[in-house]
Amino acid sequence: MSLSSRMILVLTTVGLISGGFLAGVAKLTKERIALNIQAEIEEAIKIVVDDAEVSTVLYEEEDLVIYREMEDDGQLAGYAIQATGVGFQDKITLMFGLDETLTKITGLTIIDQKETPGLGAKITGWDAFLQFWEDRDATGLLILRKPPVRTPSELLATEINSITAATISSRKVLEIVNLSLEKVRGLIAEGKIPSEEHDDH
Amino acid sequence: MTTKTIRAEYLKGLWDENPVLRQLLGLCPTLAVTGTVITGLAMGLATTFVLILSSLVVSSIKKLIPAQVRIATYIVVIASFVTIADQFLKAFFYPISEALGPYVPLIVVNCIILGRQEAFSSRNSIGRSLIDALGMSTGFLLALLVLSSIREILGAGTFLGYQVMGPWFKPWIIMILPAGAFITLGILLGIALKIESKTKRS
């Protein structure tokens, strides 16, 4: 056998065997990986929408997913918005909740971030950042409170607390939420989020 | 293979030819994922898995591979095991996989693995290649554990997530930032060189 034929034969055989192995491994792990991602999303929804039991995807596009959340008894619990945007270091994926009338933010949690450890990564901390997202006004633009305050009661409903020495990361989260809210308001106006969902209240 | 050579083959990876401290190989993951002990440990174990299996496969098929396509073949073999390790972590250790981010797929380009295939497994028996891979991966894992332990304890006051420093301790945030990785590695390399020069003198 010529050298060229041997080279082609060896590389093709190794490639085919590897491909076969990887296809098998992908088949074995695919379901479990999907479940892990699903569990992460469900956990985030439960943090931001109280009593959320049944999720339905109302709208989906790249970097934005809107879920409608129902309670066990079929009552509307609220809405969960999953959004991804640019952070200080890399993309930030977060989930925030809206009440049944889509006018108030009920909470926020960070699903994925790669901000600076010890500084920007404080956006994942309850005391430093997340507690200030409860009961925020979702009808207009939210603004960053700088310098930060100590307790949520010191903020206006349209304000979000900044983080000392990590203002950029906190502002990036705010930008992602503001952009998502604008999109949500647009979708309501276009009728893409069923009007009866928020007209009931 | 005599008992003595098996022992020497294994031990060389731990100190004399330690991939991180003596050969300065695989420094990208060494610096990038040693902010916490758990990520350092996961990276060390994933690399161990890839190195051992790649060495076994390469040493088994070395006579069949034409020299001209040997590197391409090694990369296909290594990339396959890296993908398996990545999928396994995503399926069974999802939070760790998320924390390691792109560094698990990047094991493909870790010089330790390709280096051992080219320098050792392609020229030695399956048994000897296995011992070499075990020694090298243990050396890599130990270096990562030392580095990540120092960084996590000083940078966060914790070890494996458990608080080990008292309330008086103010974490040195720089230690979990990239600069802390370079500083710690530099000090460890200095200590390793000092020990080596003292051992040679005596």
Image (cartoon, rainbow, N blue to C red):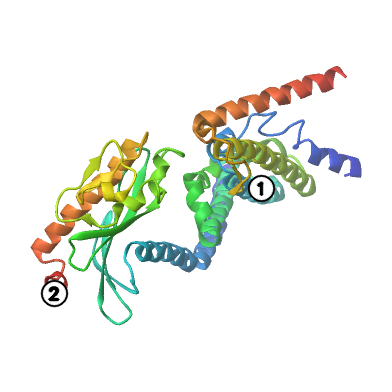
- Does residue A17 appear in this view? yes
Mark 1 or 2: in front is 2
> Residue reaching furthest top?
B201
Residue at the image position 75 percent from the left and 37 percent from the top? B14
Dot 2 corresponds to which residue?
Answer: A200
Amino acid type, residue under disc 1 in the picture: Thr
Spot occupied by residue B189 in the image (x, y as percentages of width and height): 67, 26
Spot occupied by residue B197 in the image (x, y as percentages of width and height): 78, 19
Look at the picture and state if B48 lies above or below A58: above
- Does residue B67 appear in this view? no
Q: Secondary structure at mark 1?
A: helix
**B188 or B61, which lies in front?**
B188
Q: In the rendered image, which quarter contains the N terminus of chain B?
A: top right
Please give left or right for residue B25 compared with residue B99 in the image: right
Amino acid type, residue under disc 2 in the picture: Asp
Q: Quadrant of residue A134?
A: bottom left
Q: Which mark is residue B48?
A: 1
Spot occupied by residue B34 in the image (x, y as percentages of width and height): 57, 39
Q: Chain of mark 1?
A: B
Q: Residues within 10 Å of mark 2 (few under 14, many from 20)?
A: few
Residue at the image position 27 percent from the left and 55 percent from the top? A62
Q: Secondary structure at mark 2?
A: loop
